[in-house]
């Protein structure tokens, strides 16, 4: 029985009140707020968050494949999924691939994973989609877009929802696009792209899959229709004959925004979080055509799967105090950099240190049990040489042991760096920077957890490492 | 371990003016301190048989000690460069003393020099250390700032009490620096000014942090038995201690951020060699590593100058002020000289040397009848400590 075994979303902590963006340009706000990736977040880090949420305490060495989908992958050449898989500490003997270039990449990836498991080629497959697209300042998209991610674990055992079938349409038109040098999303005239592009193809896909599997709109418990804006979403729902009150999954536009390739999986995740056994879910996603899929919820749905619900992630937020910070955090306006680094990263150093820096491995001495991060070949306590086990500590929580609010090392738009020494479970000391945190709220003994972040630029490649943040995972699930 | 107590003596010292020396190169700074030391000792370059150089990185690393050879035209002698964080110059001094104590040389030089103000950085830079990713954005004030909150918490000081205690150290050192011609800063500050200064790494404000300066200091060292051939008032090496911790404090399991092994061990070794039982009573003057006010406070307690948790009482009573029971950083310390890293240890030793000779540049700065003085640097993240104890009487 092939289907979804687990799932989990990620919404960055930062939010922008759309009124701030609207007021900056003398425009009307569409209301509500949008999610904003922090200056140390990108589609890779958000995918790591979502995938870790989805995997929860599952054994990571049992995962047989990993796909990543995004139109905002940090690397154009160099696989992004290998980096995410390493941060997740997945095994090396796995299939990996990146999907991109279209907002339909998320569902295309999900279907490929489902097909892989269904064919018996793999027993399970982890997929994650993330996006952090930029609309031009002053544009509608600047308000409607959001940043986010979601991950789904597909498998052949005890799924919470079985994969019942899919239907796809490929379509060629220039409606929404970016050339290689474009930072911002380009679009053709709104009426053309919404009528002939989005609405026409979403309708065709939804009606097509219903017909293919001999279903009526009334048979569907929840229809999951990612949409570029609420009005277009409402019109589509109405034209398809679904009951907006009972059958329609919230498109997350009002308080998160349109998160590109991640949106279908984020909405699917939110739908599964509220689903009941026997529910039939219809997911459709647009992008140069459309994909539709049907899932049937099983009686496994009540069992614990992932860590944080979409609703919890929405509630847990930090409002950006002003629009300019959004512009600089998203690299639309460059912030004055902090002090130059004297020691630039090196590809060889990064490669040698990947087990600690990326996979978050500490060493645990086999003789005395002393744990240190990063890995130490000679034990700090008993000085045994090369007699240790590597232990992944990325999901350990802990407490702030000491901290300082450092004004010297930060960026001009984010001047305070909270240097933190935390004591994690097992007496492990972790030294890092606190992120997603209002500096004045830090206290000794504050509960913290680890989060994978982009650490700084240097040597022409991206550098990632783990940071601390006030505990955000968990909640009610 | 053996001893070099009373086996080596300093017979001449020099110290450049410290500050933003836009006018002076690394070589100029070295010449300034070396020629003062030559004159003080009554020697010249031909008398130097070996030289130990303390220099960390600025303005460039990877040039060995050749810049010193070229600046001073030292010919055909070994010149050895030491780089060991903030203890760089102290270790150059200690190695030079060990070399003459061994009998291998009669007269050697230890010189520390650093030219920070050619780098274009207002501070010491960020992201230093062992791995560029792990230590990205670790700054010096950030690392030392981590001590403060633990200290406040452990000894029950409110944030306000803690900050005021630290500010009093800054006020003391600025008061001392105002009388020291070679210091970078000569401004006296009020407690209010220190407390209201911009925050650098909370709770450390601007006046809790040392400046960033250029400078150089130099010592001419000879065997103790020959020292009086050079001058009537040589200063003898009584004891030293150098200790390095085995892991960045940030990563050490169970570390309390109060008991720094490097500080405890280096001071104990130095006291033992010098025969000091009670440093609070027996030392007459001390120059300790006040890169940040919290560092000076931590040193009081790790060196046994104050009982644990009681530094505040000594700070409040003025015990470490000029005229107090144990004057500390009587020249203004790193606070007022700034911290050209590779020069600081010898600059501090210069002050102790002059004090022990009774030759402080201004009479009001002179400690009355001192016999024993200590100079000290503490560096790295912090991880290494070096102590030298000097005396004006040969035992």
Image: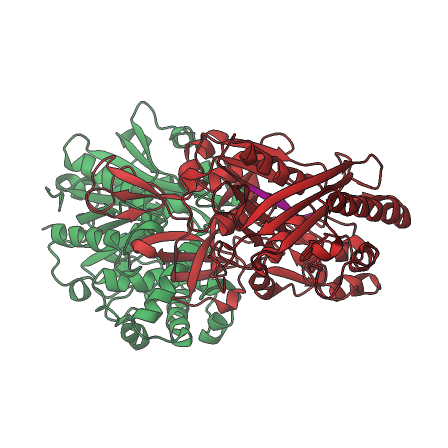
Residue at 39%, 53% in the rendered image: A396
Q: Which residues are magenta?
A: A127-132
Q: Residue furthest top?
A: B76
Colour assigned to chain A in the rendering is red
Residue B217 position (above or below residue B164): above
Query: Left or right: B106 with respect to A240?
Result: left
Residue B379 makes an appearance in the image = yes
Which of the 4 image quarters holds residue B365?
bottom left
Residue B25 makes an appearance in the image = no
Residue A175's spot in the image, x, y percent? 84, 41
Colour assigned to chain B in the rendering is green
Residue A10's spot in the image, x, y percent? 57, 53
Residue A241 position (above or below residue B219): below
Residue B35 position (above or below residue B285): above
Residue at 38%, 57% in the rendered image: A422
The one nearer the camera, B217 or A236, is A236
The one nearer the camera, B372 or A437, is A437
Residue A468's spot in the image, x, y percent? 46, 55
Query: Left or right: A333 with respect to A95?
Result: right
Colour setting: by chain
Query: Left or right: A187 with respect to B311?
Result: right
């Amino acid at each position: 029985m092939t289907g979804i075994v687990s799932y989990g979303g990620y919404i960055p902590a930062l939010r922008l009140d759309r009124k701030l963006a609207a007021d900056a340009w003398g425009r009307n706000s569409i209301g509500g707020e949008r999610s904003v990736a922090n200056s140390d977040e990108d589609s890779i880090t958000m995918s790591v968050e979502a995938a870790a949420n989805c995997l929860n305490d599952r054994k990571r060495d049992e995962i047989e494949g990993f796909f990543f989908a995004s139109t905002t992958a940090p690397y154009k050449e160099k696989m992004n999924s290998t980096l995410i898989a390493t941060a997740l500490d997945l095994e090396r003997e796995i299939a990996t691939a990146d999907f991109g270039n279209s907002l339909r990449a998320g569902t295309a990836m999900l279907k490929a994973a489902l097909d892989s498991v269904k064919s018996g080629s793999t027993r399970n497959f982890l997929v994650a989609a993330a996006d952090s697209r930029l609309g031009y300042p002053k544009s509608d998209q600047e308000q409607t877009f959001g940043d986010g991610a979601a991950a789904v674990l597909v498998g052949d055992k005890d799924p919470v929802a079985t994969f019942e079938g899919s239907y796809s349409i490929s379509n060629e038109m220039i409606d929404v696009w970016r050339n290689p040098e474009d930072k911002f999303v380009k679009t053709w005239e709104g009426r053309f792209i919404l009528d002939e592009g989005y609405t026409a193809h979403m309708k065709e896909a939804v009606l097509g899959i219903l017909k293919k599997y001999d279903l009526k709109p009334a048979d569907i418990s929840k229809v999951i229709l990612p949409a570029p804006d609420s009005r277009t979403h409402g019109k589509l729902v109405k034209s398809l004959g679904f009951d907006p009150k009972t059958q329609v999954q919230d498109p997350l536009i009002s308080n998160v925004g349109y998160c590109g390739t991640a949106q279908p999986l984020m909405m699917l995740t939110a739908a599964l979080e509220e689903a009941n056994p026997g529910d039939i879910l219809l997911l459709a996603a647009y992008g140069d055509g459309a994909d539709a899929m049907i899932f049937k919820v099983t009686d496994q749905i009540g069992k614990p799967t992932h860590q944080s619900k979409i609703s919890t992630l929405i509630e847990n937020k930090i409002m950006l105090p002003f629009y300019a910070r959004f512009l600089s955090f998203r690299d639309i306006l460059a912030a004055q950099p902090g002090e130059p680094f004297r020691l630039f990263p090196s590809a060889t150093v990064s490669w040698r240190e990947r087990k600690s820096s990326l996979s978050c491995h500490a060493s645990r001495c086999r003789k005395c049990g002393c744990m240190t991060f990063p890995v130490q070949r000679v034990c700090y306590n008993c000085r045994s040489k090369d007699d240790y086990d590597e232990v992944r500590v990325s999901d350990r929580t802990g407490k702030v042991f000491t901290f300082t609010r450092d004004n010297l090392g930060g960026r001009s738009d984010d001047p305070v760096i909270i240097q933190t020494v935390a004591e994690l479970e097992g007496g492990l000391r972790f030294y890092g920077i606190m992120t997603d945190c209002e500096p004045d709220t830090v206290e000794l003994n504050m509960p913290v957890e680890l989060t994978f972040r982009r650490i700084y630029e240097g040597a022409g490649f991206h550098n990632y490492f783990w940071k601390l943040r006030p505990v955000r995972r968990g909640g009610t699930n | 371990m053996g001893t070099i107590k009373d086996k080596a003596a300093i017979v001449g010292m020099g110290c450049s003016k410290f500050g933003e020396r836009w006018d002076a190169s690394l070589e100029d700074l070295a010449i300034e301190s070396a020629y003062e030391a030559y004159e003080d000792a009554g020697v010249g370059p031909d008398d130097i048989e070996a030289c130990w150089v303390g220099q960390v990185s600025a303005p460039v690393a990877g040039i060995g000690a050749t810049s010193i050879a070229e600046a001073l035209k030292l010919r055909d002698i070994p010149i050895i460069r030491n780089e060991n964080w903030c203890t760089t110059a102290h270790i150059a001094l200690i190695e030079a003393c060990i070399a003459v104590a061994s009998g291998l040389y009669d007269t050697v030089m230890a010189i520390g020099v650093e030219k920070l103000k050619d780098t274009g950085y207002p501070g010491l830079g960020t992201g230093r250390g062992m791995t560029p990713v792990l230590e990205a954005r670790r700054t010096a004030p950030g690392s030392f700032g981590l001590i403060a909150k633990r200290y406040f918490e452990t000894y029950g000081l409110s944030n306000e009490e803690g900050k005021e205690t630290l500010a009093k150290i800054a006020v003391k050192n600025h008061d001392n620096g105002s009388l020291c011609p070679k210091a970078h800063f000569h401004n006296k500050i009020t407690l209010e000014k220190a407390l209201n200064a911009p925050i650098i790494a909370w709770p450390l404000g601007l006046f809790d942090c040392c400046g960033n300066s250029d400078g150089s200091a130099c010592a001419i060292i000879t065997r103790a038995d020959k020292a009086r051939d050079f001058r009537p008032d040589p200063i003898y090496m009584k004891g030293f201690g150098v200790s390095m911790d085995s892991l960045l404090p940030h990563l050490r399991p169970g570390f309390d951020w109060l008991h720094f092994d490097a500080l405890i061990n280096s001071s104990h070794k130095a006291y033992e060699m010098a025969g000091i039982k009670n440093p609070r009573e027996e030392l007459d003057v001390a120059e300790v590593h006040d890169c940040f006010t919290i560092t000076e406070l931590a040193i009081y307690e790790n060196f046994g100058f104050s009982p644990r948790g009681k530094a505040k009482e000594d700070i409040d009573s003025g015990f470490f002020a000029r005229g107090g029971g144990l004057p500390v950083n009587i020249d203004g310390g790193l606070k007022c000289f700034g911290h050209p890293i590779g020069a600081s240890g010898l600059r501090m030793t210069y002050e102790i040397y002059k004090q022990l000779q009774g030759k402080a540049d201004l009479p009001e700065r002179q400690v009355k009848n001192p016999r024993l003085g200590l100079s000290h640097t503490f560096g790295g993240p912090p991880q290494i400590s070096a102590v030298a104890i000097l005396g004006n009487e040969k035992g």
